[in-house]
Amino acid sequence: MLLLVLELAGTAVFAASGALAAVRARLDVFGVVVLGMTTALGGGVIRDVLLDVSPPTTLRDWRYLLVPAITSLAVFWYHPQVARLRRAVLLADAAGLGLFTTAGTTTALALGAPVYTACLIGMTTGIGGGALRDVLLREIPMVLRKEIYALAALAGAAVVALGDRLQLPAGPVSVVGSALVITIRVLALWRRWHAPVARGLDG
Amino acid sequence: MLLLVLELAGTAVFAASGALAAVRARLDVFGVVVLGMTTALGGGVIRDVLLDVSPPTTLRDWRYLLVPAITSLAVFWYHPQVARLRRAVLLADAAGLGLFTTAGTTTALALGAPVYTACLIGMTTGIGGGALRDVLLREIPMVLRKEIYALAALAGAAVVALGDRLQLPAGPVSVVGSALVITIRVLALWRRWHAPVARGLDG
Amino acid sequence: MLLLVLELAGTAVFAASGALAAVRARLDVFGVVVLGMTTALGGGVIRDVLLDVSPPTTLRDWRYLLVPAITSLAVFWYHPQVARLRRAVLLADAAGLGLFTTAGTTTALALGAPVYTACLIGMTTGIGGGALRDVLLREIPMVLRKEIYALAALAGAAVVALGDRLQLPAGPVSVVGSALVITIRVLALWRRWHAPVARGLDG
């Protein structure tokens, strides 16, 4: 129950990030809703396709459709306020990344995937929606540019995999894993952590 | 039988739209054929992946391969005439959108998907091929820019879902649903309907 | 056993092509690894999704994860040397295309797909990873621009399908098919073969 609430919150914040990007790209109201829903549902659909869950869970449950639709419309109407809350949106995006990654890893483990497979599928769940959003708007996906993005997701997935191996209860472990992802992302944004780029490109 | 003919016609017109876009991007003859076939088959492949039909129907039936290949080559050789027929291509694209959306919705319902899931999968079937075409050519997908695109597809999917609920015969219902999509798209193009964009972007 | 070694070599060279493209786009070390792995694993994941193999083979076997990760890191650290070896990378990309295409076709035939379906899925396996790489970096995929790319893959897939029909042993046939793809690609690059573009675009 706690997990469902958290997962819907993740859906909402990813929808907000997609809708806000669409508003900035000057799309009309339908484009904003389509991109918001694609961002919110994309990661889960990719996860279910990889795990052969058909039709995808997020397309079967009306709550997963209603939440991003309403969120996208809210962003469309109130976007100046949302844009001013840019820091809150980045925080929310980090929350979505953490929650979707841990939920994806948990689902993959429950369906019998090996540990590293589950971690990869969990990462893909967390990263997929945002990557779709950026590709559709012709931008290089954030996961390729923001250095601690994929690594933060991997850390969260590893926590879930470790908890599963130690047979700890899945709910609290997911909360801890999500919190770790959020903490790493927030620290990386706040401290402006940069990973190295290859040498010799300026010469 | 009527439906097969209509569906192959949809494949042909989507192939034409992809091939024409490829000619405009100055791709060579192989690029034109690859993009034409990707546009024509993409929506159906996405639908079958979501519904777990393997291997995808459109990759299993040689007619679905032959029609877009020949269409793409015809566009390559006769493209000046086709380009002059830009209005016909837009009409054909609308026809493809309508036909693929209703066929996708019908298939999803037949495989036991809930109503809103079937509508979403139907929309994705209609929209998918064109979105692939635009992403591969580095353009923002038409579905995000043309306001009545996704809404027209949704209306057609809703007609099919309603007909299924009322246990009407699937064939005529698909024709009506497709005709509705085409009508909405043609009116939107002809009357230049615009949906609102978010306020405050110019300030 | 020979095939496994060749397939891992294909994974490595595709990872190198993705990582090198990422270095050129000035991504940091994590972006380089993510793009290298996506390029190396993308084609196989698409194949397994189309053929309903779940979870995808390349996500289940740690060797398929370790090889591209190490290759990407090596490219990141030694990229000036790799860039000087541009010709070797193009050759390696051709090898990857050949190997993945024949492996994909063989897998599809083994799972009972019709001949033309298997050829299409084999082509998609060979082409998919590179297409993902180019779309993520906002470039028009090589398969749409390099004329003999898709045709070379199709020739290799046809060899595998023919060998299967004649009940020849799969191993040697795959080697012959891969060699054909590599030969066509190398000749096309060396002789600068060009396919025609549509007439009348300059007028």
Image (spheres, coloured by chain):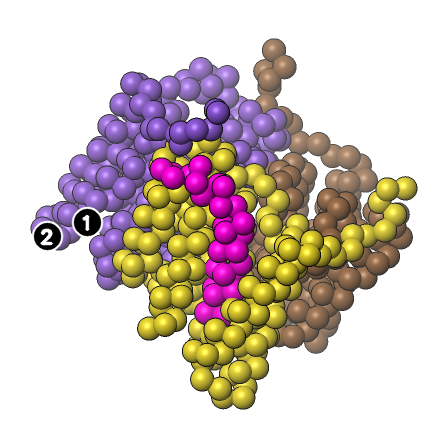
Chain colours: A yellow, B purple, C brown
User: Residue at coordinates 41% horizontally, 18% vertically from top-left?
Assistant: B85
In the image, is residue C100 above or below residue C60? Answer: above
In the image, is residue A33 above or below residue A47? Answer: above
Tag 2: residue type?
A: Gln
User: Residue at coordinates 61% horizontally, 26% vertically from top-left?
Assistant: B26
Picture coordinates of residue A23, whole percent (x, y): 45, 36
Residue B167's disc number: 2
Query: Is residue A104 at all visible to an observer of this figure?
Result: no
User: Residue at coordinates 62% horizontally, 40% vertically from top-left?
Assistant: C138
Picture coordinates of residue B24, whole percent (x, y): 55, 24
Residue C106's disc number: none
Left or right of C52? Residue C66 is right
Q: Nearer the viewer, mark 1 or mark 2?
A: 1
The chain letter for the residue carrying disc 1 is B
In the image, is residue B177 above or below residue C78? Answer: above
Picture coordinates of residue B67, whole percent (x, y): 41, 38
Residue B161's disc number: 1
What span is colored magenta in the figure? A76-103
The residue tagged with tag 1: helix, strand or loop?
Answer: helix
- In reply to whether residue B99 is colored magenta, the answer given is no
Q: Nearer the viewer, residue B33 or B187?
A: B187
Q: Which residue in the rendered view is the most extreme toward the top?
A: C203
Q: Quadrant of the N terminus of chain B?
A: top left
Tag 1: residue type?
A: Ala
Query: Is residue C195 at all visible to an observer of this figure?
Result: yes
Q: Main secondary structure of the magenta part?
A: helix
Q: Are marks 1 and 2 on the same chain?
A: yes
Left or right of C162? Residue B58 is left
The residue tagged with tag 2: helix, strand or loop?
Answer: loop
Q: Nearer the viewer, residue B31 or A36?
A: A36
